[in-house]
Amino acid sequence: MMSGDMKNKQILIDSLPQGKLTTTNFRCEDSQVPAIAEDEVLVKTIAIIISAGTRAGLQGSASYAGAPESGRVMNGTGVGEIVTSNCDNIPLGSLVTASTGWQQYSVHQGSTVEVIPSDHDPLRYLGALGISGLTAYFGLLDVAAPKPGETVLVSAAAGSVGHLVGQLASIHGARAVGVCGSDTKAKVLVEKLGFQAAVNYKTKDFREALKDATPDGVDVYFDNTGGMILGSALFRMNKGGRIACCGVVSQYDTDKPEPSPKGIPGLLINKRLNMHGFLVFDYAERYAEARHQLLTWLESGELQFLTDEVYGLEAAPQAFVDLLSGGNLGSRVVRLN
C-alpha cells in the first residue's frame, strides 16, 4: 500500500479539560498518511480501547499515561493490520497490537508493535489478553495473592479490569464481591460472571449493604476507585488483609478530587493491612506467562470477557465521556472497521 494521497482521520486533543471531560475537548481532523522509513511499519487500526486511566494523562500534569498536550493525537492502544512494512519479520497482513492512538493509520518502529495470532479474535488483545487482563492477573494473583475461602472485594467491578478480577478470584476458590454503579450491573456480575455478591454503591444504605455482602469481612480489596469506596472497604478489612491499588477513577474526571478516606494510616496500622500500589508495565517480562494462562481459562469457559462496542472513530470522544460516567459494561471498544 502506498501512503501517497491517502487521508488519515485523527482525533486530536483540542484543549485540556477544566473539571469534567467533554467532547469539546477533542477535534477530528484529516492528515496525510505518512510514509514509513527503514524498520518501520504502517498500521491500519481495526479497533481501539477506551480506558479510564488515560483520563489521568489529561489532568494538566504528567502521569504514567503521559504528559498532556493540546494539538496532538489522543493516546490509546489499538489492534490493527500491517498494510505497509519495511520489517522482514512483520509481513503484510499481520495483526498487531500497538500504541496506535485515536487514528486510522499510525507509523511504528517494528520493535514496538506486538504481532498477535491471526486465528484469535483481535479484540481479546484489547480486553482479557490485553492490558486489562494483564492488570487483573498480576494485580490480583501477584500483589494481593488471595487464598481459597477468602473474600475478595472489587471496586469498579463491572469495568474492563474489575469484571475480570472477580472471575479470577472465583477461579482460585475465593469469594468474589463486586461494587458497581447500578443494579443492572450488579445482576450481570452475579448471574453471568459468577460473583458471589454485588453491591450498587449509589444505593442509599451502601455501607450497610456492603456489610451484608461481606459477613466475614474482606481479606483482599482490589481498588480501582479510591475515594469513598476505598474508605468503606477499609472498615470491612480483616486483620492482615491486602489491598491492591490499581486506579483512582474517583479522582480522574474532576478538578476537585475527593479527599483521602478516613482510616489512613490508622486502620492500616491497627489492622496490619498491606496496601500496595502497582503498574502492570512492571510485569512486562511475564506477559507471555499470563496470556497463556488467561487464554486457557477463556477457552475452557471459566473466564468470560465483556466488550461494550461503539462504531466509528468519530464516536470515540463521546464513548470516553460516557465511560467516565459509568456508562460501560466490560471493556469499552471503538471499532473503526
Image: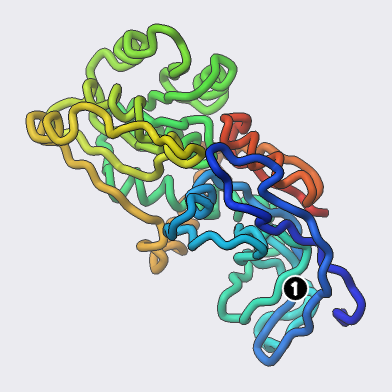
What is the quadrant of residue 154 in the picture? top left
Left or right: where does residue 86 sit relative to residue 254? right
Q: Which residue is located at x 40 percent, y 43 percent?
A: 247
Q: Can residue 132 be seen in this view?
A: no
In which quadrant of the rendered view does residue 96 lie?
bottom right
**Residue at position x 70%, y 59% in the image:** 12
**Which of the pair 64/211 is nearer the observer?**
64
Q: Determine the secondary structure under disc 1.
A: strand
Q: Name the residue under label 1.
A: 82
Picture coordinates of residue 69, whole percent (x, y): 57, 62
Residue 300, horizontal then vertical, whole percent: 55, 42
Task: Tell me: 49 left or right of 183.
Answer: right
x, y percent for residue 125: 60, 55
Q: What residue type is labelled 1?
A: Ile
Q: Is residue 134 left or right of residue 311?
A: left
Residue 85 lies left or right of residue 263; in this view the side is: right
